[in-house]
Image (cartoon, rainbow, N blue to C red):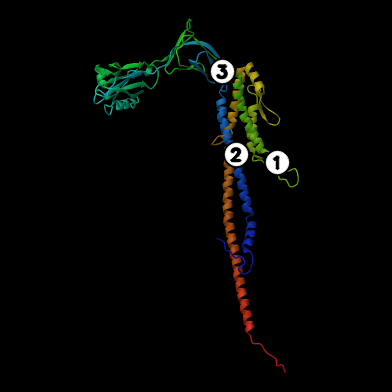
Amino acid sequence: MGLSLDGLVSGLDTTSLIKALMDVQAIPRNLLNSKMTDKGVIISNLQSLNSTIQELATKAKDVAALGALARFTTTSSSPAVTVTAGAKASAVATDLVVDRIASRHTVVTAAYSAWPDDPPVLTLQNAAGERMQITADSTSPQDVAKAISGAGFGITAQAIAAGTDVDGNTVHRLQLTASESGAEAAFQVFRGDIAAVDGGTATDVAGEAGAAIVNTGADAQIRLWAGTAAEQTVTSASGTFTDLFPGVDLTVTAVTADPVTITVAGDAPAQAKAHGEFVTGIAKILERIANGSTATIADKAGDTTTLGVFTGDSTIRALRLALSDAVQHPVDGVSPSTIGVSIDRYGVLTFDEERFTAALADDPAEVAAVFAGIATRVQGVAETYSDKYDGLLTSRISGQEREVNSLGEQIERWDVRLAQRKATLERTYARLETQLAQLQSQSSYLTSQLASLPTSQKDSN
């Protein structure tokens, strides 16, 4: 804590004097602090750019797969059939008949006020003949349902109120439902242990009086090219036929008496949009680098030249050049400009949707190959610069951070020196005030002594 000596004896504004002297002493320290602040801004921008380049690497990796940005339109002549086309799809037009939809095996038991067996031992058996023996905590229908559902055997059970018996007791039925649809998810539930099932003495709950199999687990079934010599039956446990045709999935929800026509066709506008979005993403990065590298030059006296956050950074300049080259260089002798991807003399990357659409209509395979080649090169550049271990941008950020740490250490040393200098100045002025006080005291003493000396008087004669 500094001393406050203002005007104590001398009347000097010592606080202001010390502050002025310290301001001069602190100039090197303040310059270091300003440099550290500037470095912090640079690091922040480099980190942000690095994150963007990492995202670009991930996107480019996905796009590099041949036909990754292919888009399709799908149609179905019946709402009973839904068609979905993925990136690897190709044009399809065919008819099919839905003979059966997928269903879950469902059993409803007879009505019980309490489970007939105590303890309630049950055996669960799936369509493959695998078995599990369980015992419920009590004979209440709710506990039996809980035991079945908790067995993890692919069966869920619910106790549903079903009125009262002749004695007025509430009775429940158990609704047993397979967790999955399809024939392989069908099951049986027996009253009795596994030994009783093997011995034929266990009771199948679905066969008891008042019980019923509400739904028999079944696979969905369709027929392709129905009524021809090439007719083919295809089944699915879930009702979704994955990759029925390459990259094409079908989901059926109802039986159809008449053939359903499905089609898959290329969607040129959607493909142009998807390709354009990828190119635009790269263009924005190039524009960001260009803006960050531009210096504002003073054009008249008094103006200040302002450097961009990336001005003079060789790593950023090399990144911009590498990305530009990755996009504009030919792929297997084919120039990207032929499919609408080009860079002008100012380094601005653009995507010509009209030219791309024309090229796609002319040779879709070549367009896909060229674009995959561009994406592969972009991925390589992005990973080279943004790899979290040895990427060039990552290394650049680490270097800047080391400089900031060094500046921080220098500032800390300056803070110590300045604190010591301030303390010295405060002590100096304190001593000055003390000495002035002593001199003032001595002056007062001498004055008083001189005033007390006897004076000689001359005779008036």
Q: Amino acid at mark 3?
A: Thr
Q: Position of residue 442 (x, y in %)?
A: 61, 76
Mark 2 nearby-residue class (10 Å; few <14, some 14–19, many ≥20): many
2 or 3: tag closer to the N-terminus:
2
Q: Position of residue 390 (x, y in %)?
A: 55, 36
Q: Closer to us: mark 2 or mark 3? A: 3
Q: Position of residue 40 (x, y in %)?
A: 59, 44
Q: Is residue 56 above or below residue 365?
A: below
Question: Would you say residue 367 is visible in this rendering?
Answer: yes
Residue appearing at x 64%, y 57% in the figure: 23
Q: Quadrant of the C terminus?
A: bottom right
Residue appearing at x 72%, y 42% in the figure: 297
Compared across the picture, whether 213 is left or right of 322 comes to left
Residues under labels 2 and 3: Cα distance?
41 Å
Residues under labels 1 and 2: Cα distance?
20 Å
Question: Would you say residue 322 is visible in this rendering?
Answer: no
Residue that carries the numbered disc 2 in the rendered image: 46
SS type, badge 1: loop
1 or 2: tag closer to the N-terminus:
2
Q: Amino acid at mark 2?
A: Leu
SS type, badge 2: helix
Residue that carries the numbered disc 1 in the rendered image: 296
Q: Nearer the viewer, residue 444 or 378?
A: 444
SS type, badge 3: strand
